[in-house]
Amino acid sequence: MLCIFLCKRICSILGLYHYYPVHKCPYVCVYILIFKNVIGRLVIGQNGILSTPAVSCIIRKIKAAGGIILTASHSPGGPGGEFGVKFEVANGGPAPDMVSEKIYQISKTLEEYAICPDLRVDLSRLGRQEFDLENKFKPFRVEIVDSVEIYLNLLRSIFDFNAIRNLLTGPKQIKIRIDAMNGVMGPYVRRILCDELGAPANSAINCIPLEDFGGQPPDPNLTYATALLEAMKGGEYGFGAAFDADGDRYMILGQNGFFVNASDSLAIIAANLSCIPYFCQMGVRGFGRSMPTSTALDK
């Protein structure tokens, strides 16, 4: 998932490209230059990797006014794939309809854009790079960040990592199985659950982001996450989960393949807030559920 942040005091922009070959990044950067002098900085996740939750995290961290998200969701990306555009506001959430409509009206007034096809950005190297675009624009700064580390730091401030680490490595450890489905979550799963929290490396599967997701739709449900389901049915693992391509949807399975729907997972969190340090310190303002969901949360 190729992600681009552009931020400045007046107008901040973020772009999220649902997995696309890293070498295509310069061309994405180039076309965003239509915003001319409004854009002062471009921030990209290392190797073009950034999940939707991490996008929201970084928007707030760098105090961006909003962000453009370019995503194909769980459909294959690339020249022959799908493509979509979303906008997130400063709180990291989706833009209200009135904001989207205003952006659309402004887009119809654009009269020109500039390109720089020779621009080359090394997405593997952390740090800042500056480019002088034929003196037509101010020096253009590109910053490559470790989005996984940034998101990991956010999680450290929310959850009790020591308790989770003990659950995964202690004398009464629970074995887990996590399927990233060859989407963007692979690097996050390995870094957070395996490297940071001590889960065995074989706890995480399909962790290499692929443009076509390995030929299998990265939709975390009982139909497509069959490898995870079969592994869980064996009874060896006590907890299983699968993530979609963007990292903003998931499926949870209990031991023996027991399916935990989203309504129940939220209710479980609500019933155990005392186990989550962030909520102990900050409290909870409320919970939200839609009409079709179960009443588990109400109980």
Image (cartoon, rainbow, N blue to C red):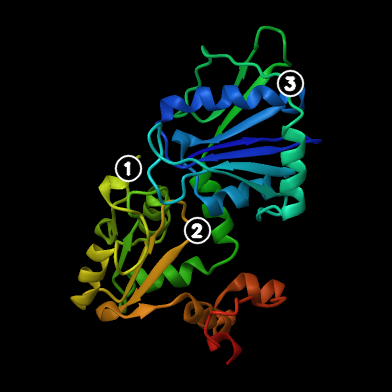
Q: Quadrant of residue 274?
A: bottom right
SS at mark 2 in the image? loop
Q: Which residue is mark 3?
A: 111
Q: Quadrant of residue 252?
A: bottom left
The residue located at (41%, 51%) in the rendering is 74
* Type of amino acid under label 2: Asp
Tell me, yes or no, whether the two marked residues, 2 and 1, touch with CB atoms within 8 Å. no
Q: Which residue is mark 2?
A: 248
Question: Viewer-proximal residue, 269 or 92?
Answer: 92
Rounded to the nearest whole Å, what is the CA distance between mark 3 and mark 2? 36 Å
SS at mark 3 in the image? loop
The picture places residue 51, in percent across and down from the top left corner, at 50, 49
The picture places residue 133, in percent across and down from the top left corner, at 65, 12
- Does label 3 or label 2 sit earlier along the sequence? 3
- Neighbourhood count class around disc 1 (C-alpha, 10 Å): few under 14, some 14–19, many 20 upward: some
Please indicate whether residue 104 sits to the left or right of residue 295 in the image: right
Rounded to the nearest whole Å, what is the CA distance between mark 2 and mark 1? 18 Å
Nearest to viewer (mark 2 / mark 1): 1
Rounded to the nearest whole Å, what is the CA distance between mark 1 and mark 3? 35 Å
The residue located at (44%, 29%) in the rendering is 124
For the C terminus, the quadrant is bottom right
The picture places residue 12, in percent across and down from the top left corner, at 72, 37
SS at mark 1 in the image? loop
Please indicate whether residue 116 sits to the left or right of residue 209 in the image: right
Question: Which residue is farthest top?
Answer: 134
Q: Which residue is mark 1?
A: 212
